[in-house]
Amino acid sequence: MALLPGPSAPLKESATPPRALIINADDLGYDPGITRGILQALREGAVSSATLMVNTPWSEEAARQARGFAIGLHLNLDRGPPVGAGFPRQGLTGDGGFAGARVDALPADAVEAEAFAQLERLERLLGQPATHLDVHKHLHRHPQVLEGVSRVARRAGLPVRSLDADMRAALRARGVATNDAFAGESGEAAWWTQERFASALAALPPEGVTEWMCHPGYPPEVVASRYAAQREVELATFLHPRTREALAHAGVRPTDFRVLHAG
């Protein structure tokens, strides 16, 4: 299957705006409860973008409900079955699912093939092109994963999330567009509280494209996730009227990765 035509720039912009903020929700399709919260954050809140896992039992329904929103690929090499054929056995568990702990043993060619297969599946499910790529659990910190992802991104003309200056430089050296700044985490405590949101907004760089990674949602209904109740805190933050008021007061309208296709 050929990839769909690349995403066009939003509205009629001809260049990347001097300051752009992307609020991207990871894990769409991971679990029904998580998906329900992300969709609510997209429809009713400040979240402006999301990334979809395509190898779960809930991916198809999540994609169906997310059509029309700005959706990228949440490349999953950590759990669940591969989408493509011939994935190396050293990267799989005994039951045929991904072994995320062994991803550093994968060759870049295998990552490239699987990333391309997952990207194709996303576009089949969504009926629209992906806006960008990122990687579940940031596994593109491993050099060969970053190389494989970069090849697919360059081929498809898609941006890739960068986490820090070194990754940003590596992606750009490979001809891949990426964000200029990044914030977000998932740990024992909820990351995007109202207080952290206000602090991050006050510190937003005056220029460039910034991504805020977030994990809004309802607690998982099926999968086990250490980031569970914390998702409800993030969901409440991005749904709160004060959040939109603060963005409007700062003159910031959240966008998506298509700003990096402008020009």
Image (spheres, rainbow, N blue to C red):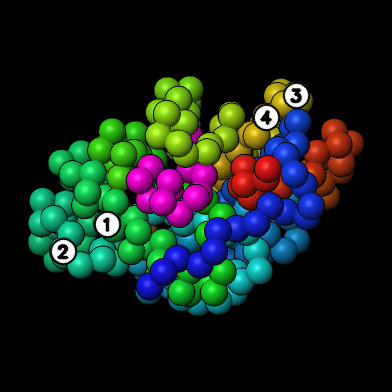
Q: Which residue is mark 2?
A: 86
User: Whole-Å distance between the Cαs marked 4 and 2?
Assistant: 40 Å
Residue shown at the point (28%, 58%) measured from the top left: 114
Q: Which residue is mark 4?
A: 208
Residue 210 colored magenta?
no
Q: Nearer the viewer, residue 222 or 80?
A: 80
Does residue 47 lie above or below 199 as drawn? below
Q: Position of residue 111 (x, y in %)?
A: 26, 50
Q: Position of residue 217 (x, y in %)?
A: 57, 57
Chain-order first, disc 4 or disc 1: 1
The amino acid type found where label 4 is placed reads Gly
User: Whole-Å distance between the Cαs marked 1 and 2?
Assistant: 9 Å
User: Whole-Å distance between the Cαs marked 3 and 2?
Assistant: 46 Å
The amino acid type found where label 2 is placed reads Gly
The amino acid type found where label 3 is placed reads Pro
Chain-order first, disc 3 or disc 2: 2
| Tag 1 near tag 2, CB within 8 Å | yes
Residue 36 falls in image quadrant? bottom right
Q: Which residue is mark 3?
A: 206
Q: Which residues are magenta?
A: 150-162
